[in-house]
Amino acid sequence: MKRLSTGIALSVLLSAPAVAGAQILVAGEGPVVYGHHHLNTTNMAAQKKFYVDTLGGVLEKFGSGDRRQEIVKFPNVLIFFHPMQAPTGGSIGSTVNHIGFSVPDLKPLVAKIKANGFKMITTESVAPNVKVTDDIAAASPTTNIAFALGPEDVKVEFVEIKTQKAPIQLHHIHFFGQMNAEMQAWYAKTFGAKMLPANPKAAFVEDQLPGVLLNFSPSPTPTVGTTGRAIDHIGFEVKNLEAFTKNLEAEGIKLDRPYTKVPQLGIAIAFIKDPWGTNIELTEGLVNVK
């Protein structure tokens, strides 16, 4: 997330800062909230080292029978995985360029990311005139940010919010596309997100849902859809999902998978794609994951 145009086996390490109360905390704040990231991976050990041991997510078992799986929980977002599914590419170059978390203090987190063997990419992720010191960028007088590459080349941004009480939580999803303003409008209309006023100093436009920002940057080069990439799809948690999908169809939006109940997971799901190829799962029931 460039602030200026000039601007989820390994045991959890005892030292990992477990995130208390990791769940979709804002579920009651709207009919649609953000729910989960779903990643393709061939290396679950690396995923757990990054999202649990390094970032402090909580590793849990989810579902039953042959659908039982490992997930990682953070406040306001769950991370699911397709194990043994090799991604066709990283997140960079796809419509979901990166995912973002916020933390109260970047310095110890950046140090831990590097100590655990993951690459910082802050300098190449911000505008040339933005000052970067020890892999932390001064994106504005009041905002510091940093970027890392997680397993399978998932780009992850960290935003410093000094007043934040949780050690880490969901902050944003950052989309790239050559029609970023149209993307902003589509997500606002489809999911009821609030379109935020454009900031002339920012390199992107924003929508807002409870607990998450949806950022949209203009991409200088064409992007590809997310299916098969390291971030295979993103997910929104929806109240009364069956009725929601009927409304989508009435608006001319094709369902790649119709409303389906999944008893082993205790949820209902459906799938759509945005007009630019972002694979989107709609769920009802993830709010019950504690």
Image (spheres, grey):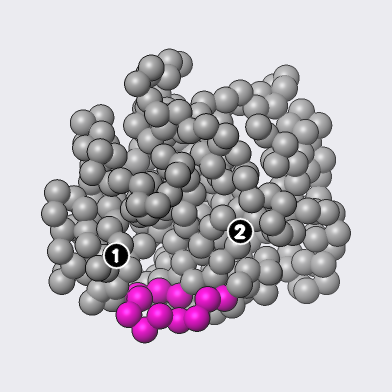
Label 2: element kind: loop
Up the image or down, 211 lies above or below 41; here it is below
**Which residue occupies 57% across, 46% down?**
76
Q: Nearer the viewer, mark 1 or mark 2?
A: 1
Q: Residues within 10 Å of mark 2 (few under 14, many from 20)?
A: some
Please, what is the three-letter code of the amino acid marked with disc 1? Thr
In screen coordinates, is 283 left or right of 167?
right
Residue toward you, 163 or 66:
163
Please, what is the three-letter code of the amino acid marked with disc 2? Pro
Is 173 a magenta residue?
no
**Which residue occupies 56% across, 31% down?**
71
Q: CA distance from mark 1 to mark 2?
A: 23 Å
According to the picture, the residue beneath numbered tag 2 turns out to be 210
According to the picture, the residue beneath numbered tag 1 turns out to be 142
Up the image or down, 235 lies above or below 42; here it is below
Measured from the top left, where is residue 190 in percent x and y? Answer: 68, 69
Q: Magenta span: helix, strand or loop, mainly?
A: loop
**Which residue occupies 15% across, 71% down?**
129
Residue 200 seen in the figure: yes
Measured from the top left, where is residue 140 in percent x and y? Answer: 27, 68
Residue toward you, 242 or 254:
242
Measured from the top left, where is residue 86 in percent x and y? Answer: 44, 37
Label 1: element kind: loop
Measured from the top left, where is residue 126 in percent x and y? Answer: 24, 64
Q: Residues within 10 Å of mark 1 (few under 14, many from 20)?
A: few
Residue 88 seen in the figure: no
Residue toward you, 259 or 141:
141
**Which residue occupies 32% across, 80% down?**
201
Give the residues in magenta. 195-205
